[in-house]
Amino acid sequence: MNKSIYKIGFFILLAINIALMVIFSMGPKRPPQRPMPNQIGIKDEIARELGFSEEQKSQFEIMAKAHRENITSLEKIERTLISNYFDQLSQENPEEKKIKLMEEIQAINREKIEVTFSHFEELKGLCAPEQLEKFEEVIAKILPAITNSGPAGPPPGNPPR
């Protein structure tokens, strides 16, 4: 009697597992990972607007990757500092620690701005004289997207999150 109950239970669980595997494998597919906002579009737009050659595009890709790695590293540090800052809500006398953390957060933001400025200087050095004529216009066009200082709402063509 006991063995038959276990066998029945085993086969029921096996059937449920198989059914779940079929449902999950046949179910709706997850949408592909979207690239980080502003990154792919901005790089392509800069290269297109400035009329970069294939060699310039290749060099720009390397520069952009290094810039993104720098910024990602700084943003990771910044997230940790911000988390530590808000952890001070649970402390008795957080003022001194809060001030120090805020100064560190500001220093990280300053460094992010300086790294981005240096990146654009490097980009400017990559341009030929005729491309330099368009450089300021291109930077002015993309700066709001980079600094998140553009108009409110998502950019055209991107769904809201």
Image (tube, grey):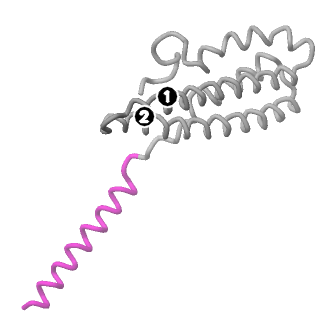
Q: Is residue 55 above or below residue 31?
A: above
Residue type at mark 2 is: Tyr
Q: Which residues are magenta?
A: 1-28
- Considering depth in this image, is 119 or 9 the residue closer to the camera? 119
Which residue shows up at 66% across the image and 28% down it? 111
Q: Please tell me how crowded label 1 is: few (under 14), some (14-19), or many (20+) other residues with Cα within 10 Å.
A: some
* Element on which disc 1 rests: helix
Image marks 2 and 1: residues in contact by CB distance under 8 Å: yes
Q: Is residue 46 above or below residue 98?
A: above
Residue type at mark 1 is: Met
Left or right placement of residue 125 versus residue 89 in this view:
right
Q: Is residue 98 above or below residue 143?
A: below
Instruction: Give residue 156's position: percent from left, percent from top.
Output: 52, 16
Q: Is residue 3 magenta?
A: yes
Left or right placement of residue 53 versus residue 91 in this view:
right
Instruction: Give residue 91's position: percent from left, percent from top.
Output: 32, 38
Instruction: Give residue 123's position: percent from left, percent from top.
Output: 81, 24
Residue marked by disc 2: 85
Q: Kindly report the distance in space between the C-alpha atoms of the residues bearing marks 2 and 1.
A: 7 Å
- Considering depth in this image, is 59 or 88 the residue closer to the camera? 88
Quarter of the image that includes the N terminus: bottom left
Q: Report the magenta stretch's main SS.
A: helix
Which residue shows up at 56% across the image and 26% down it? 106
Question: Of all residues shown, which one is farthest toward the right?
Answer: 129
Q: Please tell me how crowded label 2 is: few (under 14), some (14-19), or many (20+) other residues with Cα within 10 Å.
A: some
Residue marked by disc 1: 102
Q: Is residue 102 magenta?
A: no
Of callouts 2 and 1, the N-terminal one: 2
Left or right placement of residue 54 versus residue 4 in this view:
right
* Element on which disc 2 rests: helix
Quarter of the image that includes the C terminus: top left
Q: Quadrant of residue 132?
A: top right
